[in-house]
Amino acid sequence: MNVFGTSVQGPAHKAEGLPNQDAWLHAHVGNMRVVVVSDGMGSRPFAREGAMAACRATVDALRQWRRNPAAPPEILVSMIHLFWRARVAPLPPAECACTCLFAAADQNGMGIVGQLGDGLVLIRNDTGVRSLQNRDPNHFSNQTEGLGVSRNITAWSTAPLNTDIRAVVLSTDGVADDLLPERFEDFVNWLEKDIGLQAPQRRWRALATALRRWPTPRHIDDKTIAVLQFSRRNK
Amino acid sequence: MTTRTLKSFTAAMARPLPVLILADTSGSMSVDGKIEALNTALADMIDTFAEEDEGKAEIHVGIITFGSAAQIHQDPISASKLDFQPLSANGMTPMGGAFDLVRELIEDHDKISGRAYTPAIVLVSDGQPNDMWEPALDRLLKSERALKAQRFALGIGEDADADVLRRFLDNPEGRVYGASDARQIKMFFKAVTMSMCSRSRSMNPNATMANDFLLSDLDGMELL
């Protein structure tokens, strides 16, 4: 299994001397590999802290959940809310609001993906590429659900991962909002082949360079991509 | 190589910030230089948006007129590409038709995509609507997408229907401005222009609460 990703500060935060408010993390949880990305909501004063806490809280929650993965995903996402609130305390949760996207799977591809708020989770299996969440037709750019926005677990999307999985790509909205939906598959191909097959140090540099040289005019947001890639020999 | 590849997966246009004008072009707008003042104000606004290159968004302008009929005068398009055709005034005040058209426009994802920042709607009228405007306004205010739009209202002259304009804003803190002459029409549009440029330059161009209006620019303008 191959895990890689990176996060770069967007031009808006760079110009204003503010840090990157996206965060990402990869971890081992038992026999599972986990990747999490989170986008701190720009208007919230502790968005960066919230995003970092979201990544850690998701790992915390998965550590508990993996003891009984048959437990419904609602239990897992409830625990993410709980651990996140514990991690951001004593800061007010609303001032730390952030999105949360994660994927966790064992070597055989068995696991789970989840998404709260905007961004994009792309899942490649043997039959093609699909996104976890269909975009809300009433959505405009930079409007999102998130940790610290509501505790409504129905705002989450989750799906099980099975043995036919080949890759999961998580990205924050700085990437997702500019991607052409009809090219999602090519985007995943690019990550798997052009980036994923490189040696780790070169891979990281190539991905960071691509995100810093983002081609959409007037792009402003921080950008984060994390990839969980399964090798064919395990299939 | 990498950047060239990414270009084929990503949008080639900046995220749009749509500004949709609902302009009263009834016959009464043809007196006292009102339509001329509105045309000048709109042309100035579009020119400023076209030159706005510091913003994070690309400001798009769409114009709906209601006079002899409610119609789309200009589909939303980047201000830098817009060749503004001046409005002419005649007919009645079918404002309800304009409410339906702007709702349909905002709900049309081909014209205003999910990449766009929250649109702004600017309603300008000098009279009372004479069509079935109430159900049309109701439909506009119940449209989940259109409801999110930032809304501005300007009444021109003494016959403007402040109650209708206030109901369009649907916000207890919303202000209905009144213009009694050409200078104040231009002032209003200048403030809208600055507000939109300010949104485009802000950290989050969707944050409309803090910069709804640059009130100091509208000192002396009557609140209807």
Image (cartoon, coloured by chain):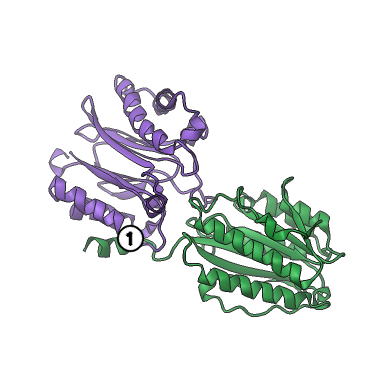
- Whole-percent x, y for residue B31 in the image: 83, 77
* Residue B135 shows in this picture: no
Q: Residue furthest right?
A: B158
Query: Looking at the rendering, in which quadrant would you find the N terminus of chain A?
Result: top left
| Element carrying mark 1 | loop
Chain letter behind tag 1: B
Would you say A145 lies left or right of B215 here? left
Residue type at mark 1: give it: Phe
- The chain letter corresponding to purple is A
- Whole-percent x, y for residue A227 in the image: 26, 44
Residue labelled with disc 1:
B9
The answer to which of A25 and A15 lies nearer the viewer is A15
- The chain letter corresponding to green is B
Would you say A111 lies left or right of A173 here? left
* Residue A114 shows in this picture: yes
Q: Residue at x 77, y 65 (%)?
A: B125
